[in-house]
Amino acid sequence: MLKQRTGNLPNLIVIGTQKGGTSSLHYYLSLHPQIYMCREKELDFFIAQRNWERGVEWYKKNFVGEAKIYGESSPNYTDYPRYAQVPKRMHSIVPEVKIVYILRDPIKRIISHYMHWYSAGLENRSLSDALRNIESSRYTRRCLYYMQLEQYLNYFAKSNIFIMTSEDLYNKPQKIMQKLFTFLEVDNSFYDHKLSRIHHNSSNKRRNNALGKSLEKSPLGETIEHLPRPIREKAKTLLYFPFSQKVQRPTLDKTLEAELIDYLRPDINRLRDYTGLAFEDWCL
């Protein structure tokens, strides 16, 4: 009863990657009877610029009830160097935590990331212009997977980190989730037919027009922003749909794609060497 009132520290953290399937994975994990995933998906507690100052007691209140595994998913935990020292803070609070890093074909992730920002009205450039300076682009930084992982290897043992791909999650969910459940030391025979439901598909992205943007700034729009995440997303869809238009998936210039692949390849090869995984579904 005391734990239910004061909460618990998590022993599972999904650290990303953004637009790599974390929403679906968070949902799939929540289906397991031995796992409690926090209701607000992205707590961003270990980020100094976000919620670190709220303190450990605030963090613990997000993990209630009785479960073997308490987990959260915050893709911003793998946005180094924008958010620095995240693994250090994490290790200071939950040194034995199990970490899950879900990855995605880098080029597909970049396009999905761009569509996410564009649909939110945070990006107005074309895809080519947004990627003009490859090394300083926020879209490519998240795809330096080994560089991001390396920050955690300074604090956590390899045995505490599980690496998977969104391609495996969507193409063979039962098999990869069984491996993940084994890693988490929960019943790995668990299966639910909902393990094939995809969340936050980029093909459904919409961008608000002028009226939609006005609604965002209205008292109703501000109220919606404070709702719990699952309710918030549904409410925003209902409210803004008549005042928005579908975002078309952009086509990446072949020359620029080749430049991106050349830039990312050394990091991805280091990832292959470290994990022993082939990532055969990826374009590089």
Image (tube, rainbow, N blue to C red):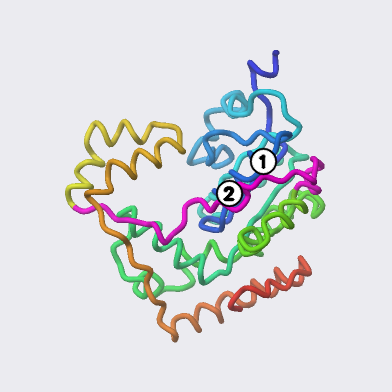
**Few, some or many residues within 10 Å of mark 2 (<14, 14–19, 20+):** many
183 in the magenta segment: yes
The mark that comes first in sequence, 1 or 2, is 2
Q: Position of residue 117 (x, y in %)?
A: 38, 57
Query: Which residue does the image show at 79% across and 48% down from the upper left?
Result: 183
Considering the numbered disc 1 on the image, is that residue within a helix, a strand or a loop? helix
Residue 23 lies left or right of residue 163; in this view the side is: left
Residue 77 got which mark?
2
Residue 93 in view here: no
Residue 90 got which mark?
1
Residue 283 in view here: yes
Quadrant in which the C terminus appears: bottom right
Residue 79 occupies quadrant:
bottom right
Contact, CB < 8 Å: mark 1 with mark 2?
yes
**199 to 221, vertically: above or below:** below
Residue 269 got which mark?
none
Residue 24 lies left or right of residue 137; in this view the side is: right
The range drawn in magenta is 181-209
Q: Position of residue 267 (x, y in %)?
A: 64, 72
Amino acid type at circle 1 is Met
Q: From the image, give the main secondary structure of the stretch colored magenta.
A: loop
Amino acid type at circle 2 is Tyr
Residue 203 occupies quadrant:
bottom left
Q: Position of residue 260 (x, y in %)?
A: 51, 77
Q: Which is more toward the observer, 267 or 283?
A: 283
Q: Which is more toward the observer, 157 or 48?
A: 157
Query: Which residue does the image show at 30% across and 60% down from the upper left?
Result: 246
Query: Which residue does the image show at 34% across and 53% down from the upper left?
Result: 120
272 in the magenta segment: no
**As drawn, which residue projects farthest toward the bottom?**
255
Considering the numbered disc 2 on the image, is that residue within a helix, a strand or a loop? helix
